[in-house]
Structures are given as C-alpha cells and as structure tokens.
Amino acid sequence: MGAGRRGLEPALSAVFFMTTDITTQTLAQLGANTPEAVAQQFAEVRRHFDEEVARRGADPSAQTALLARWMGRKSGALTQIGDNWLKPAPQDLKPIVGQEFQKLKAHIAAVVEEKRKEGEAAAENRAAARDTFDLSLPGVQREIGTRHLIRQTFDELIGIFLSIGFRVVEGPEIETPYYNFEALNIPEHHPARDNMDTFYIAGARGERLLRTHTSPMQIRTMEKEPPPVRIVVPGKVYRRDNPDATHGYMFHQIEGLAVDRDITFCDFRGTVEYFVREFLGPKAKTRLRPSYFPFTEPSAEVDATCHVCGGTGCRVCKFSGWIELFGAGMVNPAVYGFVKYDPEKLSGFAFGMGVDRLAMMKYGLTELPVLFQNDVRFLRQFP
Ligand code: PHE
C-alpha cells in the first residue's frame, strides 16, 4: 500500500494523502530518509493544519473539532506523529524528528490558543451587542387597566360617606361566630341565621367562619374605640347561596355605623336621603319600609324611586315605581351591651348595602356573574 501511494504524482498526493493518512504511516514508509525529507513531511503536516484552521473559522464548535483532531490524546494527529514518526525513527534521524515535532506542537498549541481567545472575544462582543439598546426606539406600550366596576362603585359609595364625616375601616373576612352573630344579638338557633348559612372552618383557636356580612365590624370598632363612631366598612362577604343570575357564594357590602349622643331617627333618615340623592341623582326619592334585623330596632328596608322610570312604573321596578336598595335601622340597644357602650346615653343608626346589587342597578346589568368573569369585553365598557 505505502509503496503504491508513494508512486502517485506529488500534486495528487496533497489531495489524497490527508494528514491522518501520512501520520498513520512511519517516516520510513513515507520515504523520508534524510533530515530535509523529514522537515518536508513536518512542513506538509503544518500546511494541512494551517489550511484546516483557515477553513474552520472561529466559532466554538470549530474549536472543539480542531482540538479533537489535532490534540486529542488518543487519536489526535500529534499523538499519531509521536507514535508513528518519532518512536520508530532511526537513531540518526531522531534528533531532527524530535526537533521538528516540538516545533509543530508549539505551533499548533499557539494557534489553538489564539483561536480560543478570538472565539472568546467574539462571544464577548456578541453579548455586548445584545446588551446595548437603542434609546431612540419607542418603548413597549402597556395598556393601563381600569378600575373594576365593583371597585368604581365602592369608591363612589365611600366618597359620598367621606364627604359627610364618615371614615373607612376594614376587617377580617374570616370571623368568629361571636362577632358575626352573637354580639350582633343573633344567638345560636335564632331564625335570622337561616339566610346567613356560610362556610365554617375548624381552627386550632376555635371555630371560624367566612363572615356573612360586614356588620361584625360594628362590634370590633365599638369594642376598640369610645364614641362617637362614624364609619363605613367596605368588604367581601360570603353566604351559602345557590349561584344564579343574581346570587353567588361571595358578594360585596358596605356597612355604615354612626353612634353618638342624641342621634335620632331624623339623622338616620336625613343621612339616607342625602346618600340616595348623591348616588342616584337629585330627583330620587326615598321611602322606608318596616323590616327586621336583630341588631337594629326599629329596622327598615330603604327603597328609592326607580332610577329608570323615575317612579311612574316600568319593567325594571316591576311597575311599582320603587327599587329596594338596602337594609338599615337604629342600633338596637342590646348591641351596646356587648361593647360596653352606655345605652342610656348613646344612640345611632346602621346600614348595610349590597355593592354588587347597587352596581347592577345603576349600570343596568341583569347578570351578576359578569362582574366576576373578568371578560375584557365587559370590563372595557366601564373605563
Ligand atoms: N347586615 C345586614 C345584612 O347583611 C344588613 C344591615 C346592616 C342591616 C346594618 C341593618 C343594619 O343583611
């Protein structure tokens, strides 16, 4: 085989005898018997190497391939030259083979190192280019959201009460039965609990429930603070209702409480009328119907003239001219007993409104669920 190859034209040998081929043969097989011929073989290998470097360029995968092919420990070209050229070299040629071998190794190591540095620099440049940004480009436009209709309604309601001297307090949604019921004069087994069934939680510190109304904050506030008290309490409340077009397991309320010396039914009625006119417009009229809550006495349902027909009767008010707005009443003196307020000296009124109901009414919604589905087609209608 070796003899046959030696017979080929030199020009062709450069094409067919790739580096791997000449390095798998001994120098004797290659016919290199003089120092000059040895140097020529090394020059040939070096030429192959330089060519390959030029061909591969500087990207990292080319680097890996170059390393494996030339400096690979097992079958890299240098290892083969050591095994096939240096070790079997005759005594007289050994020094020159050793010298040429060292020169070649140094050359390859230097070039590989140079390429590694070039690759590194290129990677750094690429990273730097990624990190610079063009300040003249327009920024990413993010749409600013709007307040949810419930939030808007809360804000509107709160605004009305702030303007007449009420202040906002908030309280826990997870309550004790004491604050949700007992202290509001709703003892266990009282029928008033029937429409306030809720979700109970067994806790290490005793039974807890999801509050069924914001009224517990009446108690918590009076327990903590001496009179006078004038608060509104916005928040979420929970009941075990079957979901339908106007019910869910959660809804929103805003509670009101005013307690002071000499608060009369007239103050109550005046406040209610002021509120209704602010919320529904100056033409809205108010009426009170007798009702029942254990924590108010007397209790009332507050109705307003229908915001659609103005009181003449239409489908929305079921042709009565009136719309039911919320429950309210004068604070039952029994409640003062739970918070150590003096019922002889103090009086007050309280109210509790369903915010979702008021929003539905004011904005003409027929379905409650749309308020909680976060469908942007709905939300966008209330910017
Ligand atoms: N808490 C009552 C309810 O949720 C409403 C209410 C509040 C009634 C304050 C009177 C006074 O039904």
Image (cartoon, helix red, strand yellow):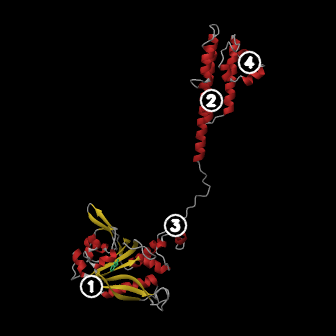
Crowdedness near tag 3: few (<14), some (14–19) or many (≥20) residues, C-alpha within 10 Å: few
Q: CA distance from mark 3 to mark 2?
A: 57 Å
Q: Earlier in the sequence, mark 2 or mark 1?
A: 2
Q: Earlier in the sequence, mark 3 or mark 2?
A: 2
Q: Is the CB of mark 2 within 8 Å of ligand 1?
A: no
What is the residue that sits farthest to the bottom in this orientation? 312
Q: Say whether residue 133 is visible.
A: yes
Expressed as whole percent of the image width and height from the top left, the position of residue 218 reads: 30, 75
| 174 is higher (above) or lower (below) than 357 | above
* Residue identifier under label 1: 262
Expressed as whole percent of the image width and height from the top left, the position of residue 371 reads: 47, 72
The residue positioned 44% from the left and 77% from the top of the image is 246
* Residue identifier under label 3: 145
Q: Which mark is residue 135?
A: none
Q: CA distance from mark 1 to mark 4?
A: 122 Å
Q: Is the CB of mark 3 within 8 Å of ligand 1?
A: no
Q: CA distance from mark 2 to mark 4?
A: 27 Å
Crowdedness near tag 4: few (<14), some (14–19) or many (≥20) residues, C-alpha within 10 Å: some
Whether pointer 2 and pointer 1 mark residues with C-beta atoms closer than 8 Å, the reply is no
| 265 is higher (above) or lower (below) than 159 | below
* Residue identifier under label 4: 5
Whether pointer 3 and pointer 2 mark residues with C-beta atoms closer than 8 Å, the reply is no
Residue 116 is drawn in which quadrant? top right
Q: Is the CB of mark 1 within 8 Å of ligand 1?
A: no
The residue positioned 35% from the left and 82% from the top of the image is 327
Image quarter for ligand 1 equals: bottom left
Residue type pointed to by label 3: Gly
Expressed as whole percent of the image width and height from the top left, the position of residue 355 reads: 42, 76
Q: Nearer the viewer, mark 2 or mark 4?
A: 4
Residue type pointed to by label 4: Arg
Residue type pointed to by label 2: Leu
